[in-house]
């Protein structure tokens, strides 16, 4: 399985990248029992110039094209943005503005954000979740916000593990092919439905009523 992490942090080191790495490690750990997980990180600060050029000329540069291809091919996504002006960053939004509108349809996505104050935690619900719902992604129920005071405090590790478990479950369910036993059961269930319910053409029903 391929897990792609999109981090919109700007500084080095970055709390946004730190949260992204912890979420990725937790998700990979949860998924490892089912399948090998390949984790790829997309740092948007390295793509800022190419994203701007894409808006003006309509063509992605080499690095941006590779990042867009990775996101499109991923079995699951972790997206993390810093909070700017009570919303996601402009760089974060610009990246998802240049991606194909159908690229995230049906794809499991874990949303997360970092900020200086816990007061901005609702950005997850009023900005990020609507964005990815619009892109028809499957957003996991638990979103993760990390304020400055959350690092090293109780609560954040538990939220990370819960969100990672939800994403891993979705990724595993979508990427695991049906076994012969599953196919046999599905076939038996379908046959049972056929045996239990038979469609009689309307003309035959009329003929049976006329013969009475």
Image (cartoon, helix red, strand yellow):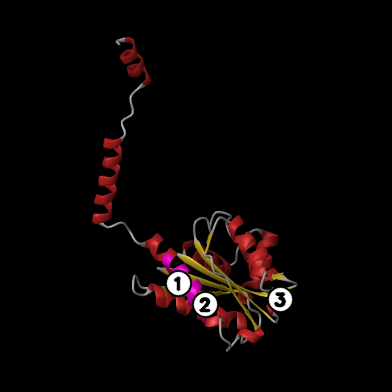
Residue 160, label in figure: 2
Nearest the eye: 1 or 65: 1
Residue 59 in view (yes/no)? no
Residue range highlighted in magenta: 158-169
Residue at the image point whose x is 47% and y is 66% from the top: 76
Mark 1 → mark 3, Cα distance in angstroms: 26 Å
Quadrant into which the C terminus falls: top left
Reading the image, the residue beneath label 3 is 119
Residue 163 located within the stretch drawn in magenta: yes
Q: Quick one: SS at disc 1?
A: helix
Q: Residue furthest bottom?
A: 152
> Residue 41 appears at what percent x and percent y?
52, 75
Q: Residue furthest right?
A: 85
> Residue 190 appears at what percent x and percent y?
30, 43
Q: Quadrant of residue 101?
A: bottom right
Mark 2 → mark 3, Cα distance in angstroms: 19 Å
Do labels 1 and 2 touch, CB within 8 Å? no
Nearest the eye: 114 or 77: 114
Q: How would you rate the neighbour count of disc 2 (Cα within 10 Å): few for under 14, some for 14-19, many for 20 or more?
A: many
> Residue 49 appears at what percent x and percent y?
67, 71
Q: Quick one: SS at disc 3?
A: helix
Q: Is residue 80 above or below residue 207?
A: below
Residue 165, label in figure: 1
Nearest the eye: 197 or 34: 197
Residue 130 in view (yes/no)? yes
Residue at the image point whose x is 35% and y is 62% from the top: 176
Residue 210 located within the stretch drawn in magenta: no
Residue 145, label in figure: none
Mark 1 → mark 2, Cα distance in angstroms: 9 Å
């Amino acid at each position: 399985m391929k897990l792609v992490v999109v981090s919109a942090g700007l500084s080095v080191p970055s709390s946004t990248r730190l949260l992204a790495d912890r979420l990725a490690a937790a998700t990979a750990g949860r998924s490892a029992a089912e399948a090998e997980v390949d984790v790829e990180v997309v740092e948007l600060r390295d793509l800022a110039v190419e994203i701007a050029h894409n808006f003006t000329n309509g063509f992605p540069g080499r690095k941006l094209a590779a990042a867009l291809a990775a996101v499109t091919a991923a079995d699951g996504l972790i997206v993390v943005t810093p909070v700017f002006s009570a919303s996601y960053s402009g760089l974060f939004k610009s990246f998802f503005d240049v991606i194909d509108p159908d690229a995230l349809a049906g794809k499991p996505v874990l949303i997360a954000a970092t900020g200086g104050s816990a007061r901005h935690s609702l950005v997850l619900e009023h900005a990020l979740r609507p964005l990815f719902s619009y892109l028809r992604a499957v957003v996991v129920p638990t979103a993760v916000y990390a304020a400055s005071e959350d690092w090293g405090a109780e609560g954040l590790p538990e939220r990370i593990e819960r969100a990672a478990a939800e994403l891993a479950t979705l990724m595993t369910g979508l990427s695991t092919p049906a076994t012969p036993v599953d196919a046999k059961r599905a076939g038996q269930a379908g046959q049972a439905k056929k045996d239990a319910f038979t469609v009689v053409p309307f003309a035959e029903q009329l003929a049976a009523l006329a013969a009475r």
